[in-house]
Structures are given as structure tokens and as C-alpha cells.
Image (cartoon, rainbow, N blue to C red):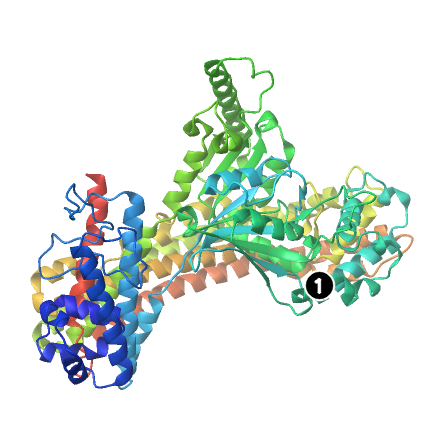
């Protein structure tokens, strides 16, 4: 059968009629000559027949346009890509490389070597085509009897769909230039507001691609009404428990935070209202979604329009004066805002997140913050260049999140970004060359100073390798509007290149097409049957390979377990000796007046954590667990490196192989089944590495979480004290609990971590063995004549797969 016809039927969602066209020997030429009666004979059902006639009419019209030299050479919509060159029987010279190039006579010439953008666009269309094929195959399988093989194949097709997004977390104090930086990097000058209104440090803002339409969109996610009720109650209790004027002075950051939050939402009305009054529905008329626990979606035609709409959910105008219309600013109720930008290649598989530096007092906002920070592939610490090396807040942010992004996360890159590199006085009268020289000198000095400062942070280095930290000096203003610097010297292009590398569209397409190729190979191999002798030999060979790998895999992981056990045992003994001394530094700081009474009250009310508006978080659980985490940090990083390539766990998985390439050369009659097993092996290794990455976070955080659970009862008892002497009672309650439980608490934390490590080891061994044995059983020991013939689909996908594999080689050459 002509492949062109098969391809068209698949594209048009008519794959069930392929056999009928094959029986009648319909090729590309005869397709164009089909009359109504012919079509009625081929497709007797009215619905599919109407669809076929309409698509055939469009195909003829486009073919006519090409012949007349009036072809539109823009990239086609994925649903109508008939102008893409077709993989016919002409041979391997045909290609899926995007646009065709006209010569001087207006005719199409040879395919030109595509740019990366063209390559990405053509690969996107490849992916769309292969997904269409697999959806049609799924439908055909669904119409068959649910045999074991049939169910297995449908599951494998469903598992092909993945959307792994890389997160880039952006930290920095207000005024450091985060919004301008993000705008410049993604090429949207007016997306995130800058200047006239101040950024709210508690709202997370995600920026990602809109892959569904050409609109600018924003989803506003709110905290729940119950959470706001609890927050209002806590604020009220704080005021009641701490009437002392010292805690309410203009110098009290926490009190200013409360005033700012309530004033943003209620104006001055909150001063005379009870918490219950402040929950009146009249305050939420503009955001009924808040009362219904739903997201609010904003849709606009431009970035500037969207920015004007969502500003009230992310920013705060603190300078509203007399005579101005009082506006409500809803950021105190907002958990997260997700902005979607159309036509942005840098964000296709990357989400940039503007993050608060310290988490949040609100429980759900803090949980979301921790989850996002722990999932960041890269972290950008943003500081103004004038005092980047000495700015305390930026370095405190890095220290606070190091455990979350390092051993407790998956961050591979820390970028310290010095902004406003062109912001130098008295440059207006100088020549352009002098300006550039001055800026270059300043940037060089800033980079050296920041690198020296990072060199002092030995605790952070336990979480990261030496090449993880890089410094950039950028000028967003010069990149967007400037004339004194060329764009390259603003270093924004370097950050854009970094995002391009994270946006591995080729990898996503290759993985999907490879998986589809393997599944179609198995389907076709199972429908053909035969080669029983070769199947038996290959099955025995592969089973032996699996058994040979399982033993060294288990041994490597057991060696790690013993090393962890040794480190943790030392950490437990150190914790028992030092915890009470460490606790005294926490409970009796140098300045421990009535302000500390309020802080400790917050600690016991919030499960051991005090989250200030600015500055360092106080976490008693982390303090008590610090000797345990310190004892394993270096060993943990060696065992679970965030790049996922080395170490005893990632290393043994990368080394695992069934040697299917060699077997294909020897046993050609089971080639299709071996192709499937090869793709299954790669998919399994990817799945295991993802699971290790996720579980290692849980394992690392288990130490502190076990301590927190052990301290829970103590916090509850301490929180009950009020009035005179309550500070002393809280301190004594905590000290007594730690003294009495230290001989159990730290051993329990060690036990929990080791148990989780054992569970991970068991999961890896069992998954490797059972998954591959099931795949062998169903590929080499099962034939099913009822499985549909997918030879045409396999031919198409195999050609696309071969072409995708060639792309990296062509780029290298």
C-alpha cells in the first residue's frame, strides 16, 4: 500500500479504514481521482465518509496552490500540515526539516539546513503526528478483546505522555530588579510590573508558556476562607497577648507586616473590626472565586493589559493618599499566580518562579513554597551589583534554602545574578568606549567579590559540587532599550542560552517517538508470531543478563546503606551530647526581652518555626536535627548527586543493560521484540532515576520531620501558657522535653531514615526485576493474532525515529 495514503488516513482520524484502502490498492495517484461512488464503496459509514471527503477536498486545493506557485510557506498548524514533505517510498532523502525554500523561479528547491527554531517547529509537528498515530492505535486496541497483552499495550501507550517541566526559582529582595530581569530574559518588556507599586514578598508568581492559544493568561490561586479566618484570629491573638508598645513600634517588622496586610485588603476599616466582621462577604465581591475556593482566570490580548489586571493580586500601593480612590489589593489572600505567555520558545518546558526568600507563615503557602523550591533545577539569586557581595539578605536566602535545593532538592545550578550593571553615575559625558570599559571593570570586580564570598560558605558546599555556582552581571535596561552596550555584554543572552538548554524539546520528542517505536514494534511482532526457537534462546540470554545485574546492584546499594548507618550513628551520639547546649543558644538569645516572648510564642504555635517578614527563619526542629544532617551531608551528596549521573544508585542504573543491540544482529527474526525491549529498558531507567530523585528528598527531610513529630506534644503544652511567667514556662517545658527524650528521639530519626533507604533499595530491585520480566513474558512468550496490523504506522514512526537520532550527529558535524 502507498504510504502517503496510509499517512493521510491516520492524520484524518480514519485509520480503521486503512485495510479497506489497502485491499483496493489505492495509491497517491488514484486517491486524487476517487469519485463519490468510489468513496461510498470504500467508506460506507456516513460520518467517516463526510470527514474523508472534506479532507480530500482540502488536500486537492493545497496541492493545486503548490503547483501554481502560491504556496504559503509559514509553519502550518499541526492539524493541517499537508505542506510538510511526506515520508514516501522515495527513500531516506526525504526529511521533516520544516519550511521549503524557493529558488528564483518560485519553485521549491532542496531542503535547507534548518535553524534551531525551525528544527523545534518541525519536531513539534513530528510529535503531533506520532501522538495522533498512537491515539488511533489505542482506539483500535480498545476495540479488541482485553487480553493480557492488549491491556499491557494500552497501559504502555498511556504511559508515553509526560510533561516534565524544569523549574527556575528566582530569589531576591524587593528592589533588586527581579521583575525587570525576568521580563528581559523572556523578551516580554511589560509583563511583570516594575516601579510604581511595590512587590509583595509573599506571593509566588510562575511564568510559563501558553501552549493552548495566543492569549496572555493568568490563574490566581487563593488560600482558603478557613485559612484566612485562622490568620485573622492569629493576628488578633498576637495583639491581645502582646499589648506592650515595644512589640508594636514602628521598628517592629512583624507588626508592620500585619498592618500592611490588613490595610491592603481593608483600608482603615480593619482597625475597628473583629475578625468575624472582616470575613463579611462585601469585602470579597470582586473575587467570588475566593469564597468558592476556585481559581480566578484573567485572559488578555497583550502582556501590558494582563499586567494591569493581575497587579492587584501580586503588588501593593502603599502610597494611596487623601483624595485618591481607595483600591483593594488582594495579595494577602493569594497563594500563587501562574502567568502563561504565548509564542515563547524559552518557556516551552521551563517555568520561571518568582519566590519569597523565606517561605510563609500561611501553612498552605509555605507547603507550596517548599515543594517548588525543592523541585527547582536551577536557582537565581538576584542582587543589585552595587553591594552584591556584602548584601546580607541575598546570602541569608541562599543559606536558608540550601538544604531544600541541595540534598533535599534537585538543584544543579546556582546563579548569583548581579543586576543594574550599567547603573553608574557620571557616565553621560564619557565616550561609549569609556563607558564600556568602566562597566567591564566593575562587572569583573563584582564577580570576583561574589565568588570570594561564596567560597566562605562551607556548609552550603556540602550540598553542591564545585561547578554548580556561577556569577552573572546583567543589565536588563540596556538589553531592552540601551545603546551604550551591545546585547551580548549585558549577559542576558547567557541566561537565555541557559534556558534554551533546559528546554530540551528534542529530548521530549525523541523519548516519545522512541517509546512509540518500541510499542509498535511489539504489536507488529506479536501479530506476526513465529521464530519460536530464536525467542527461547533470546529469552534465556536476557533473563541471565538481568540476574547478572541484580547482584552487583544490590551490593552497591548495601555498601551505601552501611556508610549511612555509620555516619548517622556518629550524628546520633553528637546530637545527644550537644543538643541541650545548642538549645540554650536558641532559647536564650542575647536580646531576649518581651519581643522574644512573642517570637517563642510563634515558635510553639507553629510547630517549632518562626517565620519573620525579613531575615533568617528560626526553626527549632532544624536546630535539633542539625548534628544529624551535618553528619551525612557530604555522604548524601555523593550518593544522590542532583545531576543524576553518578553515585551508587544512579551509577548502577546507568550501567544496567540487556545488550539488545548485539542480540538484534544475531537474531533478526525477533528484531521487533528486541527493539521493544530496548526502549523498555531506557524508559525503565528513566522512571527509576526519577523515583530516586523524588524519594531522596523525602529521605533527607525525614531527619527533621521525625524530630518535629517528637517535639509536637512539647509545643502543644508550651503553647498553653499565657500571662506573667509564660516565657519562663515555655522555656522550661521545651528544655525538659528535650532532656527526657534525647536518648530516644535521635535514634528514632536515624531508624526512620535507614528504613526509607532500605525501602528505596527494595523498590529498585523489585521494579528492575518485575518490570523487565513482564516485558520479556509479553514480548517473547506471547503471540496474539487478534492484535491489529500496524505495519504502516511502524514504518512511519521508524523513519521519524531514525531522523531524530541523526539530528545531534548533524549538529555536532
428 or 534, nearer to the observer: 428
728 or 750, nearer to the observer: 728
Q: How many marks?
A: 1
User: Is the C terminus in the top left, top right, bottom left or bottom right quadrant?
Assistant: top left
Residue 768 appears at what percent x and percent y? Answer: 31, 65
The kind of secondary structure element at disc 1 is helix
Q: Is residue 432 above or below residue 667?
A: above
Which residue shows up at 37% across the image and 54% down it?
A: 649
Based on the displayed image, in which of its 4 quarters is residue 533 positioned?
A: bottom left
Q: Is residue 735 left or right of residue 503?
A: right
Residue 39 appears at what percent x and percent y? Answer: 17, 80
Q: Which residue is mark 1?
A: 227
Q: Is residue 450 above or below residue 511?
A: above
Residue 541 visible in the shown view:
no
Which residue shows up at 15% across the image and 84% down it?
A: 41
586 or 301, nearer to the observer: 301
Amino acid at each position: 500500500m502507498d504510504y502517503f495514503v496510509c499517512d493521510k488516513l491516520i492524520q484524518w482520524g480514519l485509520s480503521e479504514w486503512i485495510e479497506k484502502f489497502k485491499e483496493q490498492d489505492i495509491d497517491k495517484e488514484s486517491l486524487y481521482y476517487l469519485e463519490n461512488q468510489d468513496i461510498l464503496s470504500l467508506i460506507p459509514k456516513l460520518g467517516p465518509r463526510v470527514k474523508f471527503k472534506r479532507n480530500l477536498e482540502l488536500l486537492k486545493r493545497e496541492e493545486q496552490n503548490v503547483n501554481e506557485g502560491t504556496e504559503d510557506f509559514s509553519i502550518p498548524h499541526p492539524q493541517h500540515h499537508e505542506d510538510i514533505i511526506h515520508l514516501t517510498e522515495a527513500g531516506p532523502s526525504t526529511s521533516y526539516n520544516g519550511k521549503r525554500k524557493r529558488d528564483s523561479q518560485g519553485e521549491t528547491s532542496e531542503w535547507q539546513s534548518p535553524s534551531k527554531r525551525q528544527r523545534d517547529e518541525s519536531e513539534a509537528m513530528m510529535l503531533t503526528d506520532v501522538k495522533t498515530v498512537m491515539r488511533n492505535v489505542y482506539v483500535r486496541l480498545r476495540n479488541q478483546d482485553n487480553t493480557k497483552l492488549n491491556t499491557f499495550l494500552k497501559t504502555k501507550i498511556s504511559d508515553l505522555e509526560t510533561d516534565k517541566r524544569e523549574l527556575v526559582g528566582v530569589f531576591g529582595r524587593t528592589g533588586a530588579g527581579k521583575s525587570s530581569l525576568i521580563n528581559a530574559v523572556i523578551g516580554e518588556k511589560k509583563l511583570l510590573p516594575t516601579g510604581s507599586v511595590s512587590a509583595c514578598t509573599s506571593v509566588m508568581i510562575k511564568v510559563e508558556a501558553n501552549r493552548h492559544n495566543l492569549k496572555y493568561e493568568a490563574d490566581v490561586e487563593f488560600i482558603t476562607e478557613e485559612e484566612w479566618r485562622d490568620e485573622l484570629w492569629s493576628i488578633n491573638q498576637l495583639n491581645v497577648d502582646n499589648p506592650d508598645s515595644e512589640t508594636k513600634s514602628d521598628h517592629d517588622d512583624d507588626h508592620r507586616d500585619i498592618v500592611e496586610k490588613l490595610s491592603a485588603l481593608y483600608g482603615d476599616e480593619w482597625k475597628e473590626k473583629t475578625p468575624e466582621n472582616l470575613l463579611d462577604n462585601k469585602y470579597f465581591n470582586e473575587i467570588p472565586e475566593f469564597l468558592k475556593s476556585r481559581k480566578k482566570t484573567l485572559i488578555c490580548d497583550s502582556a501590558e493589559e494582563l499586567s494591569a489586571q493581575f497587579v492587584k493580586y501580586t503588588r501593593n500601593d502603599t502610597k494611596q493618599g487623601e483624595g485618591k480612590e481607595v483600591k483593594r489589593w488582594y495579595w494577602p489572600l493569594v497563594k500563587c499566580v501562574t502567568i502563561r505567555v504565548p509564542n515563547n520558545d524559552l518557556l516551552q518546558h521551563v517555568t520561571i518562579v518568582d519566590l519569597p526568600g523565606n517561605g510563609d507563615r500561611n501553612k498552605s503557602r509555605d507547603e507550596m513554597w517548599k515543594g517548588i523550591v525543592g523541585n527547582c533545577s536551577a536557582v537565581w539569586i538576584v542582587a543589585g551589583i552595587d553591594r552584591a557581595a556584602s548584601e546580607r539578605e541575598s546570602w541569608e536566602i541562599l543559606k536558608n534554602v540550601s538544604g531544600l535545593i541541595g540534598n533535599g532538592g534537585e538543584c544543579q545550578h546556582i546563579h548569583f545574578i548581579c543586576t543594574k550593571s550599567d547603573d553608574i553615575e557620571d557616565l553621560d559625558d564619557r565616550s561609549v568606549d569609556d563607558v564600556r570599559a568602566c562597566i567591564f571593570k566593575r562587572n569583573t570586580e563584582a564577580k570576583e567579590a561574589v565568588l570570594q564570598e561564596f567560597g566562605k560558605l562551607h556548609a552550603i558546599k556540602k550540598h553542591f559540587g564545585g561547578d554548580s555556582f556561577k556569577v552573572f552581571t546583567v543589565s536588563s535596561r540596556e538589553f531592552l532599550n540601551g545603546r551604550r552596550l551591545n546585547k551580548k555584554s549585558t549577559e542576558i543572552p547567557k541566561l537565555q542560552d541557559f534556558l534554551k538548554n533546559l528546554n530540551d524539546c528534542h529530548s521530549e520528542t525523541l523519548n516519545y517517538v522512541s517509546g512509540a517505536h518500541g510499542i509498535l514494534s511489539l504489536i507488529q511482532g506479536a501479530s506476526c508470531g513465529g521464530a519460536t526457537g530464536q525467542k527461547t534462546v533470546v529469552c534465556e540470554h536476557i533473563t541471565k543478563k538481568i540476574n547478572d545485574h541484580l547482584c552487583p546492584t544490590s551490593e552497591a546499594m548495601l555498601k551505601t546503606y552501611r556508610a549511612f548507618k555509620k555516619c548517622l550513628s556518629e550524628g546520633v551520639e553528637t546530637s545527644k551530647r550537644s543538643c541541650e547546649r545548642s538549645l540554650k543558644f536558641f532559647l536564650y538569645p542575647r536580646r531576649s526581652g518581651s519581643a522574644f516572648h512573642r517570637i517563642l510564642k510563634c515558635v510553639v504555635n507553629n510547630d517549632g518555626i518562626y517565620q519573620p517578614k525579613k531575615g533568617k527563619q528560626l526553626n527549632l526542629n532544624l536546630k535539633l536535627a542539625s548534628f544529624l544532617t551535618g553528619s551525612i551531608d557530604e555522604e548524601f551528596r555523593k550518593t544522590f548527586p542532583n545531576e543524576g549521573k553518578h553515585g551508587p544508585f544512579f551509577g548502577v542504573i546507568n550501567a544496567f543493560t540487556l545488550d539488545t543491540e548485539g542480540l538484534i544482529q544475531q537474531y533478526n527474526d525477533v528484531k521487533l521484540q528486541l527493539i521493544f525491549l530496548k526502549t523498555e529498558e531506557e524508559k525503565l531507567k528513566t522512571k527509576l532515576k526519577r523515583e530516586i530523585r523524588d524519594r531522596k528528598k523525602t529521605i533527607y527531610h525525614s531527619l527533621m520531620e521525625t524530630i518535629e513529630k517528637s517535639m509536637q506534644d512539647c509545643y502543644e503544652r508550651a503553647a498553653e501558657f499565657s500571662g506573667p511567667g509564660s516565657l519562663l514556662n515555655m522555656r522550661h517545658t521545651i528544655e525538659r522535653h528535650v532532656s527526657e527524650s534525647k536518648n530516644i528521639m535521635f535514634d528514632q530519626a536515624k531508624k526512620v531514615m535507614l528504613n526509607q533507604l532500605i525501602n528505596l533499595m527494595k523498590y529498585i530491585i523489585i521494579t528492575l526485576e518485575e518490570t523487565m520480566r513482564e516485558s520479556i513474558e509479553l514480548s517473547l512468550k506471547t503471540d496474539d493474532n487478534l492484535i491489529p496490523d500496524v505495519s504502516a504506522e511502524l514504518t512511519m514512526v521508524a523513519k521519524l525515529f531514525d531522523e531524530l537520532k541523526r539530528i545531534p550527529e548533524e549538529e555536532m558535524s
